[in-house]
């Protein structure tokens, strides 16, 4: 149970609030509004989805935002090279880790209730070490778990060969363990993972290639996804997603029902965009007074064909 809790929330067990859990007949489970269809793995990654959604949209890459100035009718966004963009409103969907680190300066400063909500939400870390081999030497199962004396050193391998046909295992590390792995070089991290694998398969071959993530130290993420800290106030999500003037907030951290998930980030973004649109219609006199969209009225429309493996 402790290990499942760590991976589901990417935080340490002592930090995660038990308000996220319920107990029935001594069995703990997450209070989460699960979408129908079960879990699936995107065989081609998220690129097909991103490509379809980005069609006909002006997207600027490598534009790291450093400052957002909130005026009466306009918002000015300043990026790293000093260039400015002016708009009627802005939707902020950066990871919660970036907001917690104050890497974006807001002018005027965000109100205390907003800063408290950002501070009160936890952000965890989960890293992956992908290993490509020249052949498969493991059984055709979805996961290969590692038992350890403490939950700190526990981990598991995701078998991508079962889903994609490629001889790839992905080692998953979460919580404090994930941060400690980031202190190692890519080679040292891969060597450590191979030691764990050889305990299960002594004849395991060396990987042909490996890829190591570092979400905890990546300046564009500073963590993986959010979770409830012990003692969080009940209205934290209301405050997180509440707009401040012409600035709106989206992302997985503001999704009550689907926190820490891609569909949660998407639906929260749709909600923020719709609320922003209605706000501008009211301000510009293009419509009657309209209530803001509730987080539980998020609408998902699946229009992109995707290759999904149920493992």
Image: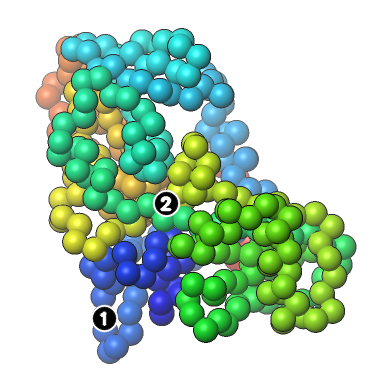
Q: Is residue 241 above or below residue 62?
A: below
Query: Residue at 57% of width from left, 82% of height from top?
Result: 147
Q: Can residue 36 be seen?
A: no
Q: Is residue 199 above or below residue 233?
A: below
State which quadrant residue 127 falls in: bottom right
Query: Residue at 47% of width from left, 55% of height from top?
Result: 125
Q: How many marks?
A: 2
Identify the colour scheme used: rainbow
First in sequence: mark 1 vs mark 2: 1
x, y percentage for residue 200? 72, 82
Q: In this orientation, which residue lies closer to the viewer: 173 or 195?
A: 195
Query: Residue at 37% of width from left, 47% of height from top?
Result: 252
As helix, strand or loop, the secondary structure at mark 1 comes to: strand
Write down the residue under mark 2: 225
Q: Which quarter of the figure is the C terminus placed in?
A: bottom right
Q: In this orientation, which residue lies closer to the viewer: 217 or 44?
A: 217
Q: Is residue 69 above or below residue 49?
A: above
Q: In this orientation, which residue lies closer to the viewer: 75 or 126?
A: 126
Task: Kindly give the residue lying farthest to the bottom in the view shown.
Answer: 25
Q: Can residue 187 be seen?
A: yes
Distance from disc 1 to disc 2, alpha carbons, whole Å, reads 24 Å
As helix, strand or loop, the secondary structure at mark 2 comes to: loop
Q: For mark 1, does the 10 Å Cα neighbourhood hold few (<14), some (14 to 19), or many (20 or more) residues?
A: few
Q: Which quarter of the figure is the N terminus placed in?
A: bottom left
Task: Kindly give the residue lying farthest to the right in the view shown.
Answer: 134
Query: Residue at 60% of width from left, 72% of height from top?
Result: 156
Residue 23 got which mark?
A: 1
x, y percentage for residue 302? 48, 45
x, y percentage for residue 244? 20, 28
């Amino acid at each position: 149970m402790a290990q499942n809790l760590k991976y589901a929330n990417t935080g340490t067990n002592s930090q995660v609030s038990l308000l996220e859990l319920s107990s029935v007949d001594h069995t703990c489970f997450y209070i989460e509004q699960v979408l129908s269809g079960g879990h699936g793995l995107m065989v081609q990654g998220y690129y097909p989805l991103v490509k379809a959604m980005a069609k006909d949209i002006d997207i600027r890459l490598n534009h790291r935002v450093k400052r957002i100035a909130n005026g009466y009718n306009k918002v000015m966004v300043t990026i790293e090279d000093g260039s400015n963009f002016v708009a009627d409103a802005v939707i902020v969907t950066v990871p919660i880790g970036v907001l917690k680190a104050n890497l974006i300066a807001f002018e005027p400063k965000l109100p205390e209730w907003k800063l408290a909500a950002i501070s009160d939400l936890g952000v965890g870390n989960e890293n992956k070490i992908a290993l490509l081999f020249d052949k498969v030497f493991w059984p055709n199962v979805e996961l290969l778990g590692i038992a350890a004396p403490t939950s700190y050193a526990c981990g598991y391998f995701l078998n991508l060969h079962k889903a994609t046909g490629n001889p790839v295992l992905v080692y998953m590390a979460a919580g404090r363990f994930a941060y400690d792995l980031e202190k190692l070089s890519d080679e040292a991290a891969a060597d450590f993972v191979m030691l764990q694998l050889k305990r299960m398969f002594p004849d395991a071959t060396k990987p042909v290639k490996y890829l190591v993530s570092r979400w905890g130290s990546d300046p564009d993420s500073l963590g993986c996804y959010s979770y409830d800290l012990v003692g969080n106030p009940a209205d934290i999500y209301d405050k997180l997603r509440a707009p401040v003037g012409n600035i709106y907030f989206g992302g997985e951290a503001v999704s009550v029902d689907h926190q820490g998930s891609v569909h949660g980030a998407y639906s929260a973004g749709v909600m923020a965009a719709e609320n922003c649109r209605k706000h501008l219609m009211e301000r510009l006199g293009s419509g009657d007074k309209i209530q803001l969209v509730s987080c539980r009225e998020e609408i998902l429309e699946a229009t992109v064909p995707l290759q999904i493996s149920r493992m």
